[in-house]
Image (cartoon, rainbow, N blue to C red):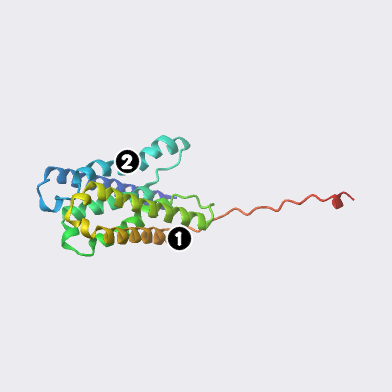
Amino acid sequence: MQSSSTTFRVVLAADVVVKLATTALLVFAALHPDWPQFAGKAMAARAVAYPLGLLVLPVVWWVVRRRSGRRYPALPDLLVSIPFLVDTAGNALDLYDAVSWFDAACHLVNWALLLGGLAVSLPRWLHPWTRLGLTVGLGSTTALLWEVGEYYAFLRNSPELATAYTDTLGDMVLGTTGSLLAGLLVLRLRPSHVPTRTAVPQWSPLSER
């Protein structure tokens, strides 16, 4: 029990650090909009959307789960929060422009982390295929929504629009693949415990004799 409590505190502390670091980088980007690594990256939209994304799980827990006395879902929240930090730090360090494979790696790894946060939250009594389907389905959907957001935020008026179709398809495939890998890994580490159904005797008129 003590080991579990220590692990929880470590994960929760890491979660808080990730959220604070992400917020600090967003503030830094807002204070330096003229820096080249932030140009054309929709940092203003990120400054609004990312803090909201970081608050979703804490608010849901506060409103719904806190009343049940359940412990704060520190691990799922950490997994969901890390991609926001990776993306913000990647922009601050100019990795998206300086490292050719960084964008592709982010789509694969970040979606694995995001959907890993969902996968570890799903009840283990669900059938394995149900858990995997929910994880991959939401991963594919959010990958699509992200690409739509990117288009309206900066791609439609960007020189990158000429190659956006190929890039969008690749990003969606990578996001879906990341969610699939996350779902399979969580199923491996946290296998389902589907309750067995007890057979109900069927009535027959012969049984009355």
Residue appearing at x 46%, y 38% in the figure: 69
Residue appearing at x 41%, y 60% in the figure: 180
Amino acid residing under circle 2? Leu
Q: Position of residue 55 (x, y in %)?
A: 32, 41
Q: Which mark is residue 31?
A: none
Q: Secondary structure beneath disc 2?
A: helix
Q: Which residue is mark 2?
A: 55
- Work out whether 47 lies above or below 138: above
Instruction: Identify which residue, 87 or 155, lies in the foreground.
Output: 155
Marks 1 and 2, Cα distance to the nearest angstrom? 27 Å
Q: Position of residue 151 (x, y in %)?
A: 26, 50
Assess whether mark 2 and mark 1 are in contact (beta carbons under 8 angstroms). no
| Residue 106 in view in this figure | no
Q: Earlier in the sequence, mark 1 or mark 2?
A: 2
Q: Position of residue 54 (x, y in %)?
A: 30, 44
| Residue 176 in view in this figure | yes
Q: Which residue is mark 1?
A: 189
Residue appearing at x 60%, y 53% in the figure: 195
Amino acid residing under circle 1? Leu
Residue 148 lies left or right of residue 121; in this view the side is left
The residue furthest left is 34
Residue 114 lies left or right of residue 64; in this view the side is left
Residue 199 lies left or right of residue 6; in this view the side is right
Instruction: Identify which residue, 157 or 175, lies in the foreground.
Output: 157
Q: Position of residue 182 (x, y in %)?
A: 40, 59
